[in-house]
Amino acid sequence: MLKPVASARVVDVVRERLRGAILSGELAPGSRLSVPELARQLEVSRSPVREAVLLLVGEGLAVEHSRRGVEVVNLTLTDLLELYELRANLDSLAARLAAARMSSTDLAALRGVLDAQGAAAIGDWRGFRELDARFHQIIVQTSGNGRLARHAELLAREMRLAGPLHINESWHLKQSHEEHREIERALRQRDAPAAELAMHAHLTRVAHTVAAHQRR
Amino acid sequence: MLKPVASARVVDVVRERLRGAILSGELAPGSRLSVPELARQLEVSRSPVREAVLLLVGEGLAVEHSRRGVEVVNLTLTDLLELYELRANLDSLAARLAAARMSSTDLAALRGVLDAQGAAAIGDWRGFRELDARFHQIIVQTSGNGRLARHAELLAREMRLAGPLHINESWHLKQSHEEHREIERALRQRDAPAAELAMHAHLTRVAHTVAAHQRR
DNA sequence: AGATTGAGTGTTACATGCAACAGGTAAAAT
DNA sequence: ATTTTACCTGTTGCATGTAACACTCAATCT
């Protein structure tokens, strides 16, 4: 059996590329996304670039100023707290649902992520965040509610735009890691209310910490 | 002082027009959205139509089959229940937040909608649903969390695609109306937990009723 | 009959052309 | 000196051209 080849569409490649550039900071918040300019750099025509840029707007990674172009969103602290408030609810719902549906494979995957996170936790906050994203992703994917997963992941990606507002000090990462462990424990024991509560508490605590940290 | 004129872009007009056509059933679930065909009918070029169609996909009103076009989504009962599950959480969060932030103007607006709903509730389920949407909209708008409002409204619109799955019998509308009254009461008394609970119970009850009604 | 081929139709996906527009800058006018 | 005007540059928004592709259905083959 051969796999279908189905060459990727240019628009998909461009979208992926731009997303990566935005999330990695290569395209900083506030940068203008000029379609002709990007088309030149990526060496494709303007059509797929235009589409990709509009899709990014739909994902919340960029904002459109009618007739005056699109730019990478620049999140304020208020925006970030809004996002945490939403995610606290969506992710805790996901945790509750996931508690009843997690297969042993899912649980093993979660465990793997947490172990890797425990090992990386020393000073590599970049890797730590990557694993953090994976942890939350596994849970929302397992919730069984596809729309919940989609919206939660959109929010998670959007949050990554607030780079400088996050806290990378090790005491905070350590704390997050321990809360992740607690969530995993509740999931493993199929204790839906506990998982929901732990997830909600986790994200709320992070939000408060971020807010307090910024008010310095 | 003159207001700015800022003529609407074609893409916006087309998007609005297509959204209306989809939500009203003029473009039935499952219909193919052929860009050249729509462009002919709307008498504009294909570019703005293509963009508008893609935006509708982003809104969840249509699905894209790579290289094989876009069609209006056809929601299954499972989809609808997924949507209710999500909205139960988002809207109840909104209700909790709104309880603390509602101005007397907001409360009056809510009251107006409910009174109109009480009067229309006899047999006009179309008008009833319109007012139902307005009721929920006011609450999510008042929550103060813009993203919450955006996502909740996307979900609410998506739900309207499940036309035939809904229940239009008067006992059900009456029940919903009473639950709305209860939510409004909690909001008026600024009782956040009660508002949250009432909203959650309301949407969960509707979901259960719909599920039971379909299983006949 | 049932599978295969191939023409024909319509579409998507990408490329490109271009008018209208926004923003900047420098010269001209007050 | 400050406002006005004119010009220039680059972009957006819409229009259109077209190759590759997907689908249908009738003709052909096994």
Image: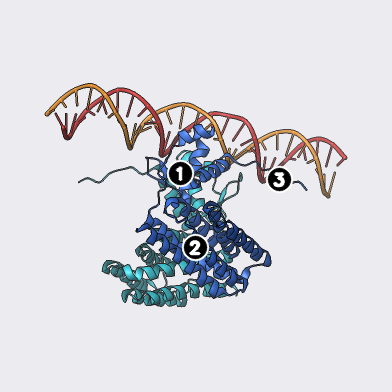
Chain colours: A cyan, B blue, C red, D orange
Q: Is residue D14 above or below residue A128?
A: above
Task: Identify the mark nearer the N-term, 1 or 2.
Answer: 1
Indicate the amino acid at tag 3: Pro
Front position among marks 1 and 2: 2
Residue B160 percent coordinates (x, y): 48, 52
Q: Which residue position is annotated with label 2?
A: A159
Residue A208 percent coordinates (x, y): 53, 74
- Residue at 63% in and 68% down: B102
Give neighbour class at mark 3: few <14, some 14-19, many 20+ (Cα, 10 Å). few
Could you tell me how far apart the alpha carbons at marks 1 and 2 are, in whole angstroms?
26 Å
In the rendered structure, the answer to whether residue D21 lies left or right of residue A53 reads left
Residue A117 percent coordinates (x, y): 37, 71
Q: Which mark is residue A42?
A: 1
Taking depth in this image into account, of B206 and B85 the one nearest to the observer is: B206
The answer to which quarter of the image holds residue B110 is: bottom right
Q: Which residue position is annotated with label 3?
A: B4
Give neighbour class at mark 1: few <14, some 14-19, many 20+ (Cα, 10 Å). some
Indicate the amino acid at tag 1: Leu
Q: Quadrant of the C terminus of chain B?
A: bottom left
Could you tell me how far apart the alpha carbons at marks 3 and 1 are, in whole angstroms?
37 Å
- Residue at 41% in and 73% down: A196
Residue B118 percent coordinates (x, y): 58, 60
Q: Could you confirm whether marks 3 and 1 are on the same chain?
A: no
Instruction: Tell whether label 2 touches label 1 (CB within 8 Å).
Output: no
